[in-house]
Image (spheres, rainbow, N blue to C red):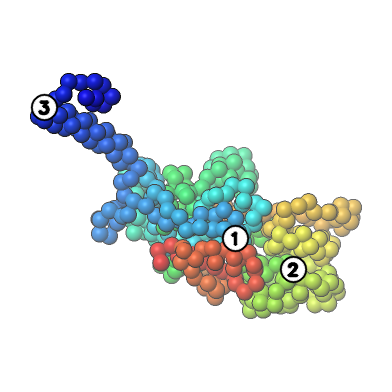
């Protein structure tokens, strides 16, 4: 007879049983060794409240494109000695999340960078935080030592552009790398809800933009695009003492929202915007124009609507080149500038603005969705019709 491919004498039953048992033992050892090797990747962290192991896998919303966001599973990230595991409670969908031309080249991936949550586990070297702390976590952090940081351009820092948490905010848990733990974790004030905390990142970006544009009391401000960033710009400009704020959009829903959150006048974006600005601004164009939409038409309107000596802040940009009338801008000393992201200083400013209720963010929330409905949330934000702030709650 043959056994395992070899010719062997016909065995008695006892000999055959021994051979089969030996084979089974070898296979069992192989399985145990394989399990041991995989154990570090499959061990689940413990719930800080019950000390029971959390499930080893978590749900995530995987982005493929604006119309294809799938609920999938992946292992809960394992943390190192200087890292944190944060249970995501709330995660806002940002307008930049649905900039498909910008995002799709990196797909598939888990997006989400406006998160708040609770610390679920801490690395043994972490001393500043404890389990259960309520936190906002910044996805990008600067090094604070390079020449860009030292000159105040933190968002041009190479480190900032390379840092992120793992895998993204549209997940039940995120791993916070050591650099982000050191420079990008902020305790939520007791007066601030998790949902309100999702506005910290976008408001920090807005605060940075207006700070760099030297927003001052008494200035006239034109905000092009009344989505979430436009509405935050309107509120902050009002808080900083703008004399007159004019807002545009292509939907009546958002024009009404602009009026609600502080715009003195609203203009439909398909109208002659420069002419309408003059009508409501004592026959003058705007001192500060803030572009909050990626539409090319808005970028062109901005260059036509800024007064002499004024500033155009490109808070959002189109994915194509913009025709710029350089000679006209040169003769009228008009400043064109961009703003990207927020620094730790801007984050602190945003936290205080929300905590003190100087900027009302609670009333901007129009939709609260579970992780399985993230695709619906992306459609709402991409359509930009009847939504302002859409928040995903991964623990629902």
3D distance between C-alphas at marks 1 and 3:
66 Å
Q: Is residue 27 left or right of residue 187?
A: left
Q: Quarter of the image holding residue 34?
A: top left
**Residue 153: x percent and y percent?**
63, 47
- Which residue position is annotated with label 1? 67
Q: Vertical placement of 15 versus 168: above or below?
A: above
Disc 2 crowd rating (10 Å Cα; few below 14, some 14-19, many 20+) is many
Residue 129, x across and y down, in percent: 36, 53
- Classify residue 157 as left or right of residue 373: right
The numbered disc on residue 12 is: 3
Label 1 crowd (10 A; few <14 / some 14-19 / many >=20): some
Which residue is labeled 2 in the image? 222
Reading the chain from its start, which is encountered first: label 1 or label 2? 1
Task: Tell me if 112 is positioned left or right of 88 in this view.
Answer: right
The x, y position of residue 228, in whole percent, is 61, 67
Nearest the viewer among 260 and 9 is 9
Q: Nearer the viewer, residue 346 or 16?
A: 16
């Amino acid at each position: 007879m043959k056994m395992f491919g070899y010719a062997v004498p016909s065995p008695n039953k006892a000999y055959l049983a021994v051979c089969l048992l030996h084979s089974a033992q070898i296979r069992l050892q192989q399985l145990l060794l394989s399990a041991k090797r995989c154990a570090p990747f499959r061990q689940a962290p413990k719930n800080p409240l019950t000390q029971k192991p959390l499930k080893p896998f978590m749900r995530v919303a995987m982005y493929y494109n604006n119309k294809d966001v799938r609920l999938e599973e992946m292992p809960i990230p394992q943390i190192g000695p200087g890292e944190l595991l944060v249970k995501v409670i709330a995660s806002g969908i940002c307008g930049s999340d649905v900039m498909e031309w910008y995002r799709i080249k990196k797909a598939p991936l888990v997006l989400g960078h406006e998160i708040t949550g609770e610390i679920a586990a801490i690395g043994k070297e972490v001393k500043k935080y404890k389990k259960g702390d309520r936190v906002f976590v910044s996805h990008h952090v600067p090094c604070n030592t390079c020449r860009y940081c030292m000159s105040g351009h933190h968002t041009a820092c190479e480190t900032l552009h390379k840092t992120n948490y793992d895998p993204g905010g549209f997940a039940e848990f995120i791993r916070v790398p050591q650099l982000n733990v050191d420079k990008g974790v902020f305790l939520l004030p007791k007066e601030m809800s998790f949902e309100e905390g999702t506005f910290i990142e976008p408001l920090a970006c807005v605060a940075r933009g207006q700070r760099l544009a030297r927003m001052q009391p008494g200035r006239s401000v034109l905000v092009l695009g009344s989505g979430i960033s436009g509405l935050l710009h309107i509120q902050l400009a009002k808080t900083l003492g703008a004399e007159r704020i004019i807002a545009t959009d292509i939907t009546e829903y958002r024009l009404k929202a602009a009026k609600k959150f502080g715009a003195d006048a609203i203009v439909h974006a398909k109208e002659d915007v420069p002419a309408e600005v003059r009508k409501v601004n004592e026959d003058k164009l705007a001192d500060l124009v803030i572009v909050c939409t990626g539409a090319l038409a808005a970028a062109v309107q901005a260059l036509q609507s800024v007064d002499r000596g004024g500033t155009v802040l490109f808070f959002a940009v189109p994915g194509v080149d913009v025709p710029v009338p350089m000679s006209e801008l040169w003769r009228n000393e008009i400043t064109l500038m961009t703003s990207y992201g927020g620094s730790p200083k801007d984050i602190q400013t945003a936290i205080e603005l929300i905590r003190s209720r100087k900027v009302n963010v609670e009333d901007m929330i129009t939709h609260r969705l579970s992780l399985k409905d993230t695709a619906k949330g992306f459609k709402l934000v991409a359509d930009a019709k009847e939504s302002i702030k859409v928040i995903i709650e991964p623990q629902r």
